Amino acid sequence: MQIPIEYYLILSAALFITGVIGVLIRRNAIMVFMCIELMLNSANLTLVTFSSYLGNSIGQLFVFFVMAVAAAEASVGLAIIIALFRNKLTVNIDEINIFKW
Amino acid sequence: MIDLIYLAVLLPLIGFLVNGIFGSRIKNEKVIGLIGSGAIGLAFLVVAGAFLQTLSLPVDQRTNYVELFTWIKAGGLHINAAYQVDQLSLVMGLIVTGVGFIIHVYSIGYMHGDKSVWRFFAYLNLFIFAMMNLILADNFVLMFLGWEGVGLCSYLLIGFWYDKPFEKSTTSAAGMKAFVVNRIGDVGFLLGMFLIYLTFNSLNFTDVFARASSFDVPGSVFTLITLFLFIGATGKSAQIPLFVWLPDAMAGPTPVSALIHAATMVTAGVYMIARTSLLYAMAPTTMMIVAVIGVFTAFFAATIGLVQNDIKKVLAYSTISQLGYMFLAMGVGAFSAGIFHLMTHAFFKALLFLGAGSVIHSMHAQQDIRYFGGLKKYMPVTYGTFLVAAFAISGIPPFSGFFSKDEILWYSYTNVGFFFWLLGAITAVLTAFYIFRIHFLTFNGTPRFDEKRTHPHESPKVMTIPLIILAVLSAVGGFIGIPEIFSGENGNVFSTWLAPVFKAAELKLSYFGSYSHFEELLFMSISVVGAIAGILTARYIYLSKPEIAESTARKYGRVYKILLNKYYIDEVYESTVVKPIINGSKSFLWKMFDVKLIDGFVNGLAGSVSNASKYLRKLQTGVVQLYALVMIVGILLALFWVILSL
């Protein structure tokens, strides 16, 4: 028997909301970063779901692109966080607010 | 050659560009002068070639068009850069390039040693370029381009010696005055043009004139159009009430006064009326106004000319007066007589100015006739040629001025009335008097300058030969327009040549009335006798009994003072127009409108943005998560909106 598509979508939405909440409430920059990855992956899951449901491989192709971009983004982001830590000795984003009025 | 007529426009432009761009690097005055006058000489040959070719064509094929390119195309408006080569534009073209060439050659001598000869020749060539556009244009817009161009060159050349003091201020101020007064007239020209387009839906001469006859347009529209155009003409051609700039224009070098402010530019208004004669013929009211303004300008300017002491000032008022005659001719419907006078006037007035320039040149920039006298023995050629011009302007037969002036006077009697003839004839007497006044005071009698310190000398050949050519033209130029009373049917070559251009207008006007030959001869003799009387009076007063002049001036002190101060017209304009405008601009437009309103608005806008951002920038907290929250809330709201609207 086939698992209905709603299950996938609900799981994906749950992952996404978890990511959003994480981005909004976590203080640690690395955690915020991981939550962003979570959101990306929830989107990936949706893409794969629809790809298999519609029998169209373009969705899976997209996933590879997203993963590649996410990997590049992760490397840049982590590099920024390390540079920040060396300067400020903290990765708490509440304390990193020098770009204000 | 007709197809090549654009060369007559292009060559002066090339001359202007060459002298204007490279002139300061060409150190040799002769080369500069050669480029400048060569361009005009070649242009003259082109026009002359076109003239000869047109002459060989049958009468009904003498109007040709040379289209160059589409200049403006916007909606229904379609304007070509196209030239109209017909009898009228050829006559004007010959005058402008011919007299222009002679004056260019003269300038080589006159401007010798000046620090910026190249600038002078560049401006002169630019002037001829603009003037040829004005003359040859086949539509109002191209004509207006030339119209503005000659105004610009006039301004540039009046203020040519920009650092030289002139009367109460500088020559640049005189140039500015000319420019501003001309601008008032130009507004009239523009309004006329707008109204023409509104009425006839075209600005092309041929279309407008065809539609003027066929469209059902009320007469008041014609009156309005022609009045607006006439305002433009009064500005350019120095007529009442906009004549005040011309006397001040004498601040420029004398060849400029001869070329621009006597022979060519100032006659542009006359030419424009001749070109649009059909429109004027449909507006009898305007014709009357033109005639009245013309004859009064002729008379008033002549009275002022009687007492002025600056030789160029006298000639300036004389020019205004002669232009008045031309407008009188236009107003009474004697279009070809007006153009004929325009031509003879170009000859003899250019000659008078160049002669005066020759005198000024040898007297070291002295222009006051009270310090001349007895120059005859020093400058025989200048003396002789000036005398010819003086006879011509006085209307002594068989000099050219006699034929043209008399034709105008005769038509003003037959077409309008005795009063116009009378005022014109009185003006002719005054003209003879004032021109011989300056002639006798300059060349005859005893020298009134210090002969030990000033050594007058005849001008070089490059200046005297142009004088001689112009003297010949002034002497014999009238023979192409001998009145029919002497030459028989169609014997007046000049008016026969121009007749096709003015045929439509003259049909509209159709003056009737028969006048006997006896009448014509009588009027002619009266004006000639009057002119001779004027000359003899001037001779009696200024040569035999110089004390009469002074005692008369003292006896009629008040009149003399009014005339000497030019009826205080400048002062009246100063207090009624210039001062109020300056004061109004200062107290209202500057201090109220500009400072408070315009600046207030702009500064207020900047200030309020700055104030608002003082509070708005608080939104930028620097906390990344707040930005993310706002973004997500926004996305959610957008999503809800999309879902709800489904």
Image (cartoon, rainbow, N blue to C red):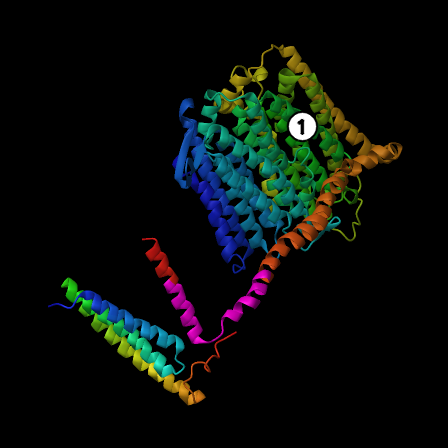
Q: Which residue is mark 1?
A: B293
Give the residue type that dot 1 points to.
Ile
x then y, percent, for residue B453: 77, 53
x then y, percent, for residue B411: 62, 19
Q: Is B459 part of what is drawn in magenta? A: no
Residue at 24%, 75% in the rendered image: A67
Residue at 39%, 86% in the rendered image: A83
Q: Main secondary structure of the magenta part?
A: helix
Answer whether residue B363 is visible to the viewer in this image: no
Which of B221/B97 is in front?
B221
x then y, percent, for residue B17: 49, 52
In the displayed structure, B572 sits above or below B459; it is above
In the displayed structure, B334 sits above or below B391; it is above
Q: Which residues are magenta?
A: B608-636
* Res. A25 image quadrant: bottom left
The residue lying furthest to the front in this view is A1
* Res. B164 image quadrant: bottom right
Residue at 15%, 68% in the rendered image: A3
Which of B362/B153 is in front?
B153
x then y, percent, for residue B143: 51, 37
Which of B445/A5 is in front?
A5
In the rendered structure, the answer to whether residue A1 lies left or right of residue B325 reads left
